[in-house]
Amino acid sequence: MEAYLDNGNTTPVDEKVVEAMKPYFTKKYGHPLFIYSKGREANETVENASESIANTVGAQGNELTFTSGATEANDIAIRGVAKANKENGNHIITSEIENPSILRICEELEDRGFEVDYLEVDDEGFVNLEQLNNLISKETILVSIGHVSDEIGTIEPIKEIGKTIKDQNPETYFHSNIANSYGKVPIDMNETQVDLLSISAHKIHGPKGVGALISRDNVAISPVNYGYLSLSEIRPGTENVPGIVGFKKAAELSFGNFDSKVKHLQNLRNKLMEGIEKNIPEVILHGPKGDKRSPANVNYSFEHIEGESILMHLDMRGISVATGSACATRKLEPSHVLTAIGVDPVTAHGAIRFTLSRMNTEEEIDYTLEVLPEVVEKLREMSPMAKKRGE
Amino acid sequence: MEAYLDNGNTTPVDEKVVEAMKPYFTKKYGHPLFIYSKGREANETVENASESIANTVGAQGNELTFTSGATEANDIAIRGVAKANKENGNHIITSEIENPSILRICEELEDRGFEVDYLEVDDEGFVNLEQLNNLISKETILVSIGHVSDEIGTIEPIKEIGKTIKDQNPETYFHSNIANSYGKVPIDMNETQVDLLSISAHKIHGPKGVGALISRDNVAISPVNYGYLSLSEIRPGTENVPGIVGFKKAAELSFGNFDSKVKHLQNLRNKLMEGIEKNIPEVILHGPKGDKRSPANVNYSFEHIEGESILMHLDMRGISVATGSACATRKLEPSHVLTAIGVDPVTAHGAIRFTLSRMNTEEEIDYTLEVLPEVVEKLREMSPMAKKRGE
């Protein structure tokens, strides 16, 4: 049996998405810039997809720009806003638990003379709203805080963050990378005060290589890349039409019967969490419990053993999970997110992240709960750390 | 009947390419950064594709960086080299007939204080080698000249250009955007002195949304985008694994039996050119004839009528072609390439570009040669310009 529980990194493409894309590879292959029938057809296809995807967050099609993924959307959102608004201020705020995608962009801006503050988080990963309130000044052009922590599932209070920002400085733009929560934790741009959102198709059973930036009409934004004409003013290059069609289909599938899909995720998450806590001693949950946690995220440290060993043993049994910083698993540094919430380095090294999707089944969770306690027990038997403790 | 003759802009994806990609959507969907089996499998897939595609131009896999397309590859090549080498000089040379992708990047660098010279071309589109020779100085960090003109099919003398550059300044890098010639006009990095090449999958019956920059080991290059980790040091973001697999397959299909494919293209091109010249009076060829012309490009002005009208009438009969500047067909400016080779604006407006691919057939050319003279005759009958002349 197989259980793919690393959907926070990437997901399998839904067969229905592949079916939807197919005609756009071999038959409807026109270039959307050109005025003959095949071009106009491609143009309409891109516009329909823009409208359909933008609507899932309460925005309009003309507010959406297709990119090669959330990384590029984040880069345009943050560097593009910084560039367009540098006359108004040089201060940016983000949080210390953002995805490396955001942190690297902010570092680049620091190198270029922008001042960046990194908000602290509490032991469950919630950003410090008071600190945010105190840091916002006339110079603050942008705040970028992700909706849900990739790693520990914390759902940040987006409405309160938006209100705090706009109460202090209505001119400050609010960007949120929602790649990890999109299709799982709802967000409506009309009910929050968020100005820019980054999303990605391959996190919701769509294809890799396509994402989008959604930015409200009033946001001043400069391109960060240059080149060939496209339908967008801020992103050059030929539109990935089949990918865009796949993205639209994946969004439709994620948002259709949304509540029952979320319920399904919550059930799987709760089952996995209860099973781990009941069957495995000495485990430590990272991130909050209940409604403030993403229905798709489970993250525990298994004391006295290395996350990487657990990962490899689970992999041998067909179970895919992430460890430590899910975004830097080829490095042996402890996760910057776990460090930020106060987890000590040894415990952080024993962390395993399970991320669920609507395509996971109860059988996969049962199988994981059958294999995981065996793996942990076996590794603890072999572990010098565990032995020492038991002596 | 249909005849798609705008393959210079984009091509239908080969069914075999779609078949090759399929398993990477739904089964082999791992993220290449992660260390469990599915991740390692994806990693190997990307590395194999790098090697295979790099080999088609005589390079090695570690010299190839996957991008979202040739536009992004051009941007990294030009701005990335400018950024990494700005201590060595601030002078860049390109030609006045480059793709807008290149020209826009160069304009951005001019805004940032770089000096850019735009080489003149002769009436067939060949760059002025003497001018190149004279312009190169100690300050010249980069020369970017496309291998084949997108628009008029001129095959630039890449070897001589490389020799001219390196004889004058061995430290000057030579970049060539070969998106339009890749798979049609061969290039071997070991037999030329080109340092960086940009290519794109969707011009060779691969998928949109994937391209590559191939840069020799010794080239100093900085990233121009920031974000999430990837296998590359200069391009962030999750690799488009299925797209990369499709790109590899498309390259294999283009380079297998290469000579017979080029022969096929030459036959179609010659048939179309002879048919036009024989059956339609008052036509003007743009670009060279014979071996110095891309086997895939045909470009004529049909005097006294508008290219756009021809395009729309051909479209109604199922034939897709490009007009004027093939890259700006939503604008009514005459093509900058035709202007550069000395074509007057009125004649430039009557230009139609036909671009062929290995998937075109003799029947499609026959059909085009049946329809095109009728269309031209009918439009000339209606044209006030033609009437005036005939009176």
Image (cartoon, coloured by chain):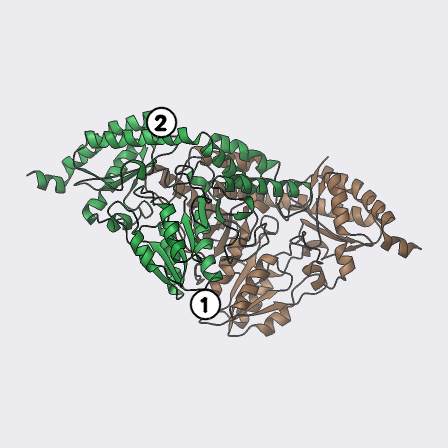
Chain colours: A green, B brown
- Given residues A48 and B53, the one toward you in this image is A48
Question: Same chain, marks 2 and 1?
Answer: no
Residue B311: image x %, image y %?
74, 46
Say which quadrant the C terminus of chain A sits in. Answer: top left
Residue shown at 89% from the left, 53% from the top = B387
**Residue A361's disc number:** 2
Q: Depth check: A267 or A298 in front?
A: A267
Q: Does B53 appear above or below B341? A: above
Where is residue B260 drawn, in percent x and y?
63, 43
Q: Chain of mark 2?
A: A
| Marked residue chain, label 1 | B
A266 vs A51, left or right, is: left
Nearer to the camera, B47 or B9: B9
Name the foreground residue: A304 vs B202: A304
Q: Which secondary structure, mark 1?
A: loop
Label 1: few (<14), some (14–19) or many (≥20) C-alpha neighbours in 10 Å: some
Whether residue B359 is visible = yes
Give the quarter of the figure containing the N terminus of chain A: top left
Q: Is residue B315 left or right of residue A213?
A: right
Q: Amino acid at mark 2?
A: Thr
Image-quadrant location for residue A352: top left
C-alpha distance separating marks 2 and 1: 53 Å
Q: Secondary structure at mark 2?
A: loop
Residue B40 image-quadrant placement: top left
Residue depth check, mark 2 versus mark 1: number of the one nearer the observer: 2
Query: Disc 1 designates what residue?
Result: B85
Q: Please report the residue visible at 65 percent of the width from the left and 61 percent of the height from the top.
A: B97
